[in-house]
Image: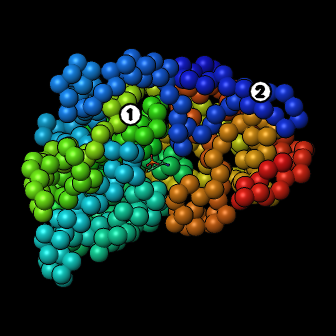
Amino acid sequence: ADSPLLPVVGQDLAAPLIQGGHVRYANLDYAASAPAVEDVAAHLNEVLPFYASVHRGAGFASQVSTSVYENARTIVADFVGARPDDTVIFTRNTTDSLNLLAGCVESILQARGYAEGRSNVHGELLYLDIEHHANLLPWQKLPHRSVVAASSIESTLARVETQLRAGNVLLLAVTGASNVTGEVLPIAQLAALAHQYGARIVVDAAQLAPHRRIDLAASGIDYVAFSGHKLYAPFGAGVLVGRSDWLDAGAPHLAGGGAVKEVRLESTRWTDGPARHEGGSPNVLGAATLAKAATILAELDASDWHSHEQQLREHLVAGFQNLDGVTVHSLFSDSASYAECGSIGVVNFSVTGYDAGLVAAYLSAEHGVGVRDGKFCAHPLLNRLGLPAGSLRASFGVGSRREDAQRLIDGVAALLRDGLGWDYVVDSGRWVP
Ligand code: PMP
């Protein structure tokens, strides 16, 4: 892991230092948004000249744009091992995808009369307490819910099964990998459990998809959602892939042009398939670049892909273990099956005696290192871990190198040894020197 696995844009960005001068920016915030792979960025320029309306024009550029867009759907379907009858819907991001699915579930519950108290209908949402808010808040809007605390892999499976056994769960919503600790969930086992008790499963793969292969057909996962901007593609596009019956039964996510069969002034017949939820002009460039990133990741040798991040992660954790004053946070490290699931390239930590936001500001200002601090849009988990003021997260991907991780270790070591070099104050909620 001395050099990047794939070249990414901005890998030689120069970050300004508070004491003057610049240093190569060590981007350790891939889990928030990953830099585009260079070939993905190049693809953007290949597609740009054909920028034209999709599905609506007969002109040459429209034809090309339409085929680029529809081809992107096929590539994404292959990338996640979709079943032949699965639907691939392009959205804005993971949040949008999960809200879309929640809207469909709401329609189904309404149609089944669940809200009116017909409690013999499977209608409950089950999720874990470690979820990102994107996989929590859409479900909170639905009438019946249960939550399972995910504190070890074995106990999570057992508690999920207990809830499922009660027999009323419609959908189990779980993250594929925690955006807080990077630890991977046993999603195929959870899918099998859900199905055993007549429920479906949706996997929030915002963190998993950029780091592990997903195979809907082989694992039985019903729905998967992820975002282009964490998958080494630009902002603005995400996907929801999964079983078409619920998606076709749901109220259209975006009512508008393209989502209809026939419109009269007072009533509309909606179309089925992805177009039902993709009203308005779609994000062709976002879909094309997301698909390009998927193609590139699919071509990677899986063991190179995983070991690149694993080596960086181990290097960072070992470096932190040598420092008195750094705590690494984990959900599952005591689990017997921890090694089978493992972790993506994320390390979550705290530095004794220092506010997380202050450490992040110091690392940026004095070492040119970018890490994320706070509660990672996962407030229930951070509160449960006893970190109500937040923690720090370093995360890597295909563009990361060992020297990035080393710079973070050296930066934290310098803080522990020498203290802050400058006075820091809170300005608009963030620490600044
Ligand atoms: N789920 C997880 C696990 C995430 O890490 C994130 C992004 N932090 C999201 C959902 C939401 O992704 P987006 O902001 O692209 O909608």
Taking the image as shown, residue 359 lies to the left or right of residue 97, namely: right
User: Looking at the picture, which amino acid does disc 1 mark?
Assistant: Gly
Instruction: Point out which mark residue 286 bears.
Output: 1
Instruction: Point out which mark residue 317 bears.
Output: none
Where in the figure is residue 393, as x and y percent of width and height? 62, 47
Q: Is residue 334 above or below residue 399?
A: below
Taking the image as shown, residue 340 lies to the left or right of residue 364, namely: left
Crowd band around label 1 with a 10 angstrom C-alpha radius: few (<14), some (14–19), many (20+): many
Q: At 67% from the left edge and 63% from the top edge, which residue is drawn?
A: 389
Where in the figure is residue 350, as x and y percent of width and height? 70, 53
Label 2, on which residue? 23
The kind of secondary structure element at disc 1 is helix
Rendered-image quadrant of the N terminus = top right
Crowd band around label 2 with a 10 angstrom C-alpha radius: few (<14), some (14–19), many (20+): some
Q: Quadrant of residue 139?
A: bottom left
Q: At 82% from the left edge and 38% from the top edge, which residue is drawn?
A: 366
Q: Is residue 138 above or below residue 70?
A: below
Taking the image as shown, residue 367 lies to the left or right of residue 225, namely: right
